[in-house]
Image: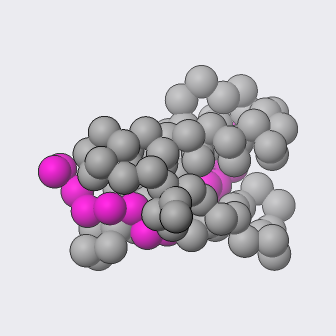
Amino acid sequence: MPFGRPAWIVVLATPDGFRQSIRTVDGGLVCGKLPGLPVDAAEVLVLETAAAMVRELGTEFHGEVLDVVWEADSAPGYWRGQVRQRS
């Protein structure tokens, strides 16, 4: 596996799109741009795109079904979510 299982994800709106950082259970950090989103994408689309990416990583690299639980008190243009294994 190229990295540990995702534990947290942060998504940040930037002038050129949306960036994500994933903290793994083993302390690693995986960062990059969320592809395919316009800079004015709706929040629901941004969060679903990020969650879909986490689910894909979980299935492909760890053989687990993962979900993201987004924190409700995020600031505008900043979202943080805890990654959990689906029960």
Specify the segment rendered in magenta: 1-15
Q: Residue at x 83, y 38 (%)?
A: 42
Spot occupied by residue 54 in the image (x, y as percentages of width and height): 48, 48
Task: Give left or right: position of 50 versus 79.
Answer: left
Task: Establish if 65 lies above or below 75.
Answer: above
Spot occupied by residue 36 in the image (x, y as percentages of width and height): 59, 24
Task: Give left or right: position of 35 versus 71.
Answer: left
Spot occupied by residue 80 in the image (x, y as percentages of width and height): 64, 67
Q: Please identify the dominant SS of the magenta region.
A: strand
Residue at the farthest left position: 1
Q: Quadrant of residue 57?
A: top left
Does the magenta portion include 7? Answer: yes
Does the magenta portion include 66? Answer: no
Q: Residue at x 81, y 33 (%)?
A: 40
Report whether residue 83 is seen. no
Task: Establish if 15 lies above or below 81.
Answer: above
Task: Establish if 81 lies above or below 30.
Answer: below
Q: Residue at x 65, y 65 (%)?
A: 69
Spot occupied by residue 49 in the image (x, y as percentages of width and height): 62, 38
64 or 40: which is nearer to us? 64
33 or 82: which is nearer to us? 82
Q: Residue at x 33, y 73 (%)?
A: 25
Task: Give left or right: position of 66 versus 25.
Answer: right
Residue at the farthest front position: 87
Q: How is the image coloured?
A: one colour
